[in-house]
Image (tube, rainbow, N blue to C red):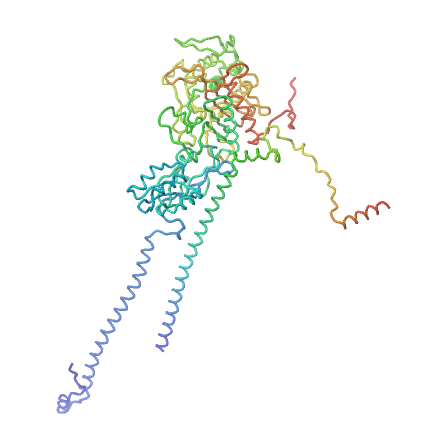
């Protein structure tokens, strides 16, 4: 670079020659030099500022970018111990009305094999067959020596079995944690709870899905993470359920019955306090469905909620109710019971000849088919249809069981006058014991519709629409009481509980038409105490038969009624019902009539 | 003057950076602790669930019935029947209890009292 001196000699001499001040030249040269420096400094400062600006910009951009990323991403809780496989096996507990556990989850292990990692597959298969006797050894052997890379061996393994498998020392046998569903009470409430099985399965976790009963009906609520910590509270009382099952199973054995069902229901709230269907099963080990044959032979069949039967004379009360409510008769009106009633080629007969006429009360007490047929004829088909519809016989019950929701009572396709007469004594229409319980609850609680429910209700009454007047309800209860004190259900008397009820012995229909002569469905529909009903008990026995007083007895008065009496004796104290015995402290004053 | 200002500023920056890093590491430690605690809580919750299930299993009606039957001689429990309901009038008033003499001193005092009363 050529540097011009501050005082260039040529110009200075020139200036001195012209008489100018040479300092001016110095000043200009200095000025020029300073200018260049200035520019250089300025450029440097500019570049520094740019760099600084860039640095700040990057800094702010980084902060802004992080803020944007935070705003867009999902908030994440601090991680829990369970590895996140996307499978949630958490399930809510099920408890009874008093808080006792009916169903809960339990941590357990599953066993799987990876055959390509196995050292001695044959020995492993043999040892496993020794530890798990129900496992098929040949199948295991084939799988372990085959080409598959992953084989489930057992879905649920107890800690002792886990130790034994571990002791085999086979690296190809591996364990994975999972939760299983445990029903601590065994066979109790089996049909109500249903059962749970595994859905999606992974080695790290497995999904529990409800398969039947309440587990299936409330499956989503049980798996909802927000509600997993609140147990589902049922209306079932565990002690009452245990007692009912025990008495019913004893009764079934004594009466040589093929099956039995009992429903105990609160008349004001519709809560099911206990519901038992026998034969039953263990929900911990649910048996597989029958593939052929009659589905009602399987223990999985819920005879109380799914079994559709012709319920027989228990329907007579509905015929009486319609006539009483319409004001056509009162309980002392005499009805012509001369029979048999002929309709075309059909004849309607009574069990015995009850004479020329009976009062409405006696029609129920003695159970006369002809009497109720005449009552139904007088009231008319439409009145009968409307009343049965209001009692819920045209629809499945709203009970919280998926099996019950699909069961519609069988109604006649053509509701002729003959149907009206046969339905008045319970033939020609088929319904479940649960439908009957709900209908009798309506008759007993003052005429209000109630919905049967398995969930605990928090209020003491869930009355719906009123379909009968209070007075009719009281009259009907008096009739039921008379059936026990002097009618077909004399074995049903339980001291102190004022039991009233109607018996029904319906011949079982043959699958191809017609009826069996020696097989009945014996039903007893009871309420207690009849002067202020609290509970309804429906007890059904399938093909009972007992030798008593010199004869083979099959009617409900000899089979279902004694079992029901024993049941009420055992269950009523558990439900905190004091027996009302004369002279037990409560004194009532009655005004003397002149 | 400017240099002093610059030095003070850089000192402040260094202090702030140190504080920021410390907070960061403290947060990481706290998160790790929370993680550990949550694992412990999960283990304890599992243990509680297992105990509840076991308690329900031990209290199932079948087993209680069997236990009652096995121990009938000692317990003499029978199923609850309607005849077991009673009135409050049936419960008697408590009887007056004479306190026992349990030590020699009280025995001598009792003796004195008796002899004293006798005089």
From where the camera sits, is residue A335 visible?
A: yes
Q: In this view, does A582 lie to the left or right of A231?
A: right
Where's residue A454, x and y in %?
46, 32
Where's residue A57, x and y in %?
28, 64
Q: Is residue A291 left or right of residue A445?
A: left
Quarter holding the N terminus of chain A is: bottom left
Give residue A124's quadrant in the image.
Answer: top left
Residue drawn at the location 35% of the way across and 27% of the way down = A291
Identify which residue, A240 or A294, lies in the foreground. Answer: A294
Where's residue A117, x and y in %?
32, 47
With respect to residue A294, does B88 lie above or below? below
With respect to residue A226, does A46 lie above or below? below
Where's residue A495, x and y in %?
59, 24
* Residue ranking furthest to the right: B119
Give residue A285's quadrant in the image.
Answer: top left
The mark total stands at 0
From where the camera sits, is residue A232 visible?
A: no
With respect to residue A451, does A327 lie above or below? above
Identify which residue, A213 or B111, lies in the foreground. Answer: B111
Quarter holding the C terminus of chain A is: top right
Identify which residue, A358 or A487, lies in the foreground. Answer: A487
């Amino acid at each position: 670079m050529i540097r011009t001196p501050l005082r260039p000699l040529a110009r200075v001499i020139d200036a001195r020659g012209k008489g100018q001040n040479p300092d001016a030249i110095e000043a200009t040269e200095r000025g020029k030099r300073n200018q260049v420096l200035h520019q250089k400094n300025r450029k440097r400062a500019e570049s520094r500022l740019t760099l600084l600006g860039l640095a700040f910009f990057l800094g702010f951009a980084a902060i802004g970018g992080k803020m944007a990323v935070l705003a867009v991403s999902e908030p994440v809780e601090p991680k829990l111990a369970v590895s996140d496989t996307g499978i949630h096996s958490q399930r809510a507990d099920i408890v009874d009305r008093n808080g006792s556990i009916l169903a809960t989850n339990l941590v357990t292990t599953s066993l799987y094999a990876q055959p390509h990692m196995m050292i001695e597959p044959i020995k492993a298969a043999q040892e496993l067959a020794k530890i798990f006797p129900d496992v098929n050894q040949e199948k295991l052997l084939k799988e372990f020596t085959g080409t598959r890379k992953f084989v489930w061996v057992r879905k649920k393994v107890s800690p002792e079995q886990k130790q034994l498998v571990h002791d085999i020392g086979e690296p190809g046998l591996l364990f994975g944690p999972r939760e299983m569903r445990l029903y601590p009470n065994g066979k109790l409430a089996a049909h109500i709870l249903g059962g749970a099985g595994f859905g999606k399965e992974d080695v790290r976790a497995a999904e529990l899905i409800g398969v039947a009963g309440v587990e299936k009906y409330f499956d989503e609520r049980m798996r909802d993470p927000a509600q997993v910590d609140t147990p589902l509270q049922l209306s079932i009382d565990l002690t009452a359920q245990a007692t009912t099952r025990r008495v019913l199973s004893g009764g079934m054995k004594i009466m040589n019955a093929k099956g039995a069902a009992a429903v105990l229901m609160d008349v004001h709230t519709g809560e099911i306090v206990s519901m038992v269907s026998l034969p039953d099963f263990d929900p911990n080990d649910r048996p597989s469905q029958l593939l052929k044959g009659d589905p009602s032979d399987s223990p999985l069949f819920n005879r109380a909620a799914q079994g559709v039967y012709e319920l027989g004379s228990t329907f007579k009360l509905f015929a009486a109710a319609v006539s009483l409510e319409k004001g056509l008769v009162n309980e002392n009106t005499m009805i012509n019971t001369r029979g048999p009633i002929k309709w075309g080629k059909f004849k309607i007969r009574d069990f015995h000849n009850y004479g020329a006429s009976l009062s409405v009360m006696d029609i129920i007490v003695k159970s006369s088919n002809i009497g109720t047929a005449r009552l139904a004829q007088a009231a008319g088909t439409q009145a009968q249809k409307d009343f049965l519809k209001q009692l819920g016989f045209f629809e499945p019950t709203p009970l919280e069981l998926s099996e019950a929701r699909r069961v519609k009572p069988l109604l006649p396709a053509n509701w002729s006058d003959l149907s009206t007469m046969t339905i008045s004594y319970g033939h020609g229409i088929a319904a479940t014991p649960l439908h009957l319980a709900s209908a009798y609850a309506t008759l007993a609680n003052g005429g209000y519709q109630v919905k049967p429910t398995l969930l605990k209700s928090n209020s003491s009454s869930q009355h719906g629409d009123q379909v009968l007047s209070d007075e009719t309800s009281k009259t009907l209860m008096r009739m039921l009481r008379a059936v026990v004190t002097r009618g077909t259900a004399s074995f049903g008397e339980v001291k102190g509980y004022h039991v009233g009820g109607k018996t029904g012995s319906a011949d079982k229909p043959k699958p191809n038409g017609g009826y069996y002569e020696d097989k009945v469905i014996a039903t007893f529909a009871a309420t207690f105490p009849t002067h202020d009903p609290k509970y309804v008990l429906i007890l059904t026995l399938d093909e009972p038969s007992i030798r008593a007083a010199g004869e083979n007895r099959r009617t409900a008065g000899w089979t279902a009624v004694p079992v029901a009496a024993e049941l009420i004796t055992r269950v009523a104290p558990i439900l905190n019902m004091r027996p009302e015995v004369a002279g037990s402290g409560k004194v009532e004053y009655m005004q003397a009539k002149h | 003057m400017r240099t002093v200002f610059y030095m003070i500023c850089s000192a402040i920056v260094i202090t702030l950076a140190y504080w920021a890093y410390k907070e960061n590491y403290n947060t990481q430690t706290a998160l790790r602790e929370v993680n550990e605690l949550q694992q412990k809580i999960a283990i304890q919750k599992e243990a509680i669930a297992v105990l509840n299930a076991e308690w329900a299993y031990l209290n199932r009606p079948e087993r209680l019935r069997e236990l009652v039957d096995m121990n009938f001689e000692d317990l003499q429990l029978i199923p609850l029947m309607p005849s077991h309901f009673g009135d409050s009038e049936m419960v008697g008033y408590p009887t007056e209890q004479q306190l026992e003499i349990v030590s020699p001193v009280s025995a001598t005092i009792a003796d004195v009292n008796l002899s004293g009363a006798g005089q």
